[in-house]
Amino acid sequence: MTEPDRYHVLNPATEEVITTLELAGLAETDAAIARAKAAFDGWRKVAPADRARLLRAFAAAVDADRERLAATEVANAGHTIGNARWEAGNARDVIEYYAAAPERLFGRQIPVAGGLDVTFQEPLGVVGVIVPWNFPMPIAAWGLAPALAAGNTVIVKPAELTPLTALRLGELALQAGIPEGVLQILPGRGPVVGQRFVTHPDVRKVVFTGSTAVGKSIMAGCAEQVKPVTLELGGKSANIVFADADLAKAAATAPYAVFDNAGQDCCARSRILVEESVYDDFMALLEPAVHGVRVGDPADEKTEMGPLISAAHRARVAGYVPDGAPVAFRGSAPEGPGFWFPPTVLAPVGHDDRAFTEEIFGPVVTVVPFRGEDDALRIANSTEYGLSGSIWTSDVGRALRVARGVEAGNLSVNSHSSVRYSTPFGGFKQSGLGRELGPDALNAFTETKNVFISTEE
Ligand code: NAP
Ligand code: MG
């Protein structure tokens, strides 16, 4: 017998141990995959209206549990209570949205000679969902909800750092009547449990959100079995501010577009591009806005930014702000225990400075000037990433030209929104592969089957 692999789950705002979990090893992972495989045939045959009803009951259970889920995320991930409530509500909304899908997974009837041709959207089988620590609840829900709705069974591997809300979602699914084995939550290490999703032939699809490096290795591994993958990877998104924008609003909102969730957001607008003629005015407005970001106890309703997720991650973020770094200005952060890092604005920076090119995934933003639309697009697109971005201008034509020109999956004009459960979300270039949320996500969890029925006598 080998020793069980135990993991201490920490509160990143206090560094206290919340609980200790046993992590699954290879044998437990294979057993979970076998259970999911055994549950598949029954789940795919549940009548569409009944599968819809079960998913609605699951959404209702999440809704009733929102305060507990939110409090758990505050403790486990250091998310502000306001954000954590939104995240629990988002998980509910995503499950409810896809509860409509079982009865609407339409195929087509295609005109052909000599018979009837119809298509079916068939479920794939067992789906493995690998979730990162930055948005544990929403990202679990974006994978599991459409996968279950389409008739697949699902195993979620939460991040080691943040397993608690995913485990709770699993309990709520069972309470709502989703049969045993249809949705399992399996805390474990990425290279053990996550990697087994890649290599096990009975897992027929992998959904991965996390770093680009691990995403590439998962895609390469899945090639071995021609296993479909959805990847949501990193970002280095541009927030492009033109001289004709509402500058006060652009500057007041820019900190929240990058420092929300302490910058641990793949959509963080971590490169601010400002038209040269208003650069100084913008910086003068940005400074008080950055100082105004309230950093502290995430359970306090007024707090706008909490700690980073771990000591190791804080050290990684701090590596982008070495002694002598060009800090234009900085917000505050609490002293004492907790993985705190103050909101930090770096300027001037060169276009090849690693703070300007690499995903920092912390509360650090770089600001650079540009001259005109072409220059803005050239700078915005000079990155391997392409997840999101914002455009601030009062000229509708320019807004559309630039939105069409930025190589990214999710753009917002005079706003910083990226995520709505009813609209597609995903990346261009090395930010990912495939789309989550919205009407198209179901395609990622089904195969199209074509059936021809002869009408000849
Ligand atoms: P990561 O290693 O990519 O982790 C993401 C998930 O993948 C976790 O559940 C992790 O499990 C799992 N994993 C790790 N190695 C694996 C493997 N070989 N096979 C299968 N699954 C594996 O990300 P990280 O190390 O936590 O963060 C590093 C950087 O990635 C961040 O600083 C940020 O730049 C980026 N990131 C991006 C996103 C995003 O939303 N796009 C999210 C998180 C991180 P464990 O928990 O056991 O490691
Ligand atoms: Mg890692």
Image (cartoon, grey):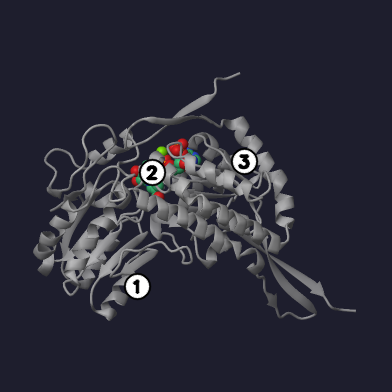
Q: Is residue 403 above or below residue 386?
A: below
Q: Is residue 250 above or below residue 384?
A: below
> Which amino acid, by three-letter code, is at mark 1?
Arg
Between the C-alphas of marks 1 and 3, the distance is 40 Å
> Which amino acid, by three-letter code, is at mark 2?
Val
Badge 2 crowding class, 10 Å Cα cut-off, few under 14, some 14 to 19, many 20 or more, is many
Mark 1 highlights which residue?
A: 404
Is residue 297 or residue 77 the one in the foreground? Answer: 297
In terms of secondary structure, where does tag 1 sit?
helix
| Residue 168 pos. (x, y %) | 53, 43
Mark 3 highlights which residue?
A: 200
Q: Nearer the viewer, mark 3 or mark 2?
A: 2
Q: Which mark is on residue 433?
A: none
- State which quadrant residue 289 falls in: bottom left
- Quadrant in which the N terminus appears: top right
> Which amino acid, by three-letter code, is at mark 3?
His
Badge 3 crowding class, 10 Å Cα cut-off, few under 14, some 14 to 19, many 20 or more, is some
Mark 2 highlights which residue?
A: 74
Left or right placement of residue 176 versus residue 384 in this view: right
Q: Is residue 127 visible?
A: no
Q: Is residue 18 above or below residue 275?
A: above
Left or right placement of residue 198 versus residue 80 in this view: right
- State which quadrant residue 15 falls in: top left
The residue sitting at 53% across, 66% down in the picture is 440
- All told, the count of numbered labels is 3
Left or right placement of residue 451 versus residue 292 in this view: right
Is residue 113 or residue 369 the one in the foreground? Answer: 369
